[in-house]
Image (cartoon, rainbow, N blue to C red):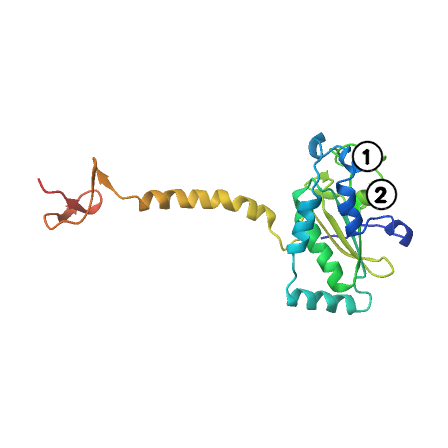
């Protein structure tokens, strides 16, 4: 993914919320009165995200790999996430991102995408408190622009951008996964029909010493039913 152009200062980064602050914010009146997805009312996802965080564990290999990265000169030392709790992609990634930050000793700050109203336009509302961050990480694809979230960005200690992803990491083939149930449905339906017992009228076809086989001009060997 091509890297965005962003100038991030320590002061701007510090304006984001740490994980516990974000969980407290989700259920606050300040957050719940903001418009949710498509302008709908928001709901309190605090308990859900806390439960998902408590259940989330990184493997030993994942912890070792990220700690190795953070130990390198100019390795990741800061993580920035733009999120909204109504987004299932954000709810999926936030517990893992927090565990990753803990494993590597990396500072994570979380920012909201929208202001009081839902951001339905291709670019952020200038009045949104984090419009500057969202503008730097807009998704541009096939001539269109999207405010895709989550944004997860990795910076060095001096706030040099190393890498970022939008909506989901490249390793997570979301489009392929989303179409998988439909593909499996098209495959499983014929298989299910093929496994059903074949009947003739109300009588189930089964082997019989009186039943013989003979060539059939249309489908090869077919059972010959006794008269």
- Displayed quadrant of residue 43: top right
- Displayed quadrant of residue 122: top right
Q: Does residue 68 appear to the left or right of 213 in the view shown?
A: right
- Among all residues in the image, which is located at the extreme left? 227
How many residues crowd around disc 2 within 10 Å: few (fewer than 14), some, or many (20 or more)? some
Question: Along the line of sight, which residue is nearer the eye, 170 or 9?
Answer: 9
Q: Residue at x 65, y 51 (%)?
A: 52
Q: Does residue 206 appear to the left or right of 53 in the view shown?
A: left
Residue 74 horizontal/vertical position (percent): 82, 65
Q: CA gap, disc 2 to disc 1?
A: 10 Å
Q: Does residue 190 appear to the left or right of 55 in the view shown?
A: left
Residue 215 horizontal/vertical position (percent): 15, 47
Q: Which residue is label 2 attached to?
A: 132
Would residue 137 be visible to someone looking at this image? no
What SS does tag 1 mark? loop
What SS does tag 2 mark? helix
The numbered dot on residue 204 is: none
Residue 140 horizontal/vertical position (percent): 72, 43
Mark 1 and mark 2 in contact (Cβ < 8 Å)? no
Question: Along the line of sight, which residue is nearer the eye, 113 or 41?
Answer: 41
Q: Quadrant of the C terminus?
A: top left
The numbered dot on residue 125 is: 1
| Total labels drawn | 2
Q: Earlier in the sequence, mark 2 or mark 1?
A: 1
Q: Residue at x 65, y 67 (%)?
A: 60
């Amino acid at each position: 993914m091509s890297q965005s152009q962003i100038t991030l200062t320590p002061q701007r980064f510090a304006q984001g919320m740490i994980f516990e602050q974000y969980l407290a914010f989700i259920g606050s009146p300040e957050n719940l009165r903001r418009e949710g997805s498509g302008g709908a009312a928001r709901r309190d996802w605090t308990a859900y995200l806390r439960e998902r965080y408590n259940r989330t564990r990184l493997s030993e290999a994942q912890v070792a790999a990220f700690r190795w990265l953070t130990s390198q000169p100019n390795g990741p030392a800061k993580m920035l996430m733009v999120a909204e709790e109504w987004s299932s992609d954000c709810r999926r990634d936030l517990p893992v991102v927090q565990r990753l930050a803990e494993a590597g000793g990396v500072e994570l700050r979380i920012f909201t995408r929208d202001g009081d109203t839902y951001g339905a336009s291709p670019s952020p509302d200038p009045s949104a408190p984090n419009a500057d961050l969202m503008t730097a990480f807009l998704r541009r694809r096939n001539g269109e622009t999207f405010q895709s979230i989550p944004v997860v960005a990795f910076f060095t200690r001096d706030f040099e951008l190393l890498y970022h992803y939008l909506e989901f990491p490249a390793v997570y083939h979301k489009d392929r996964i989303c179409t998988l149930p439909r593909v499996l449905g098209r495959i499983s339906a014929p298989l299910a029909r093929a496994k059903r017992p074949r009947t003739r009228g109300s009588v189930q076809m089964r082997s019989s010493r009186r039943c013989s086989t003979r060539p059939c001009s249309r489908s090869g060997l077919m059972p010959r039913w006794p008269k």
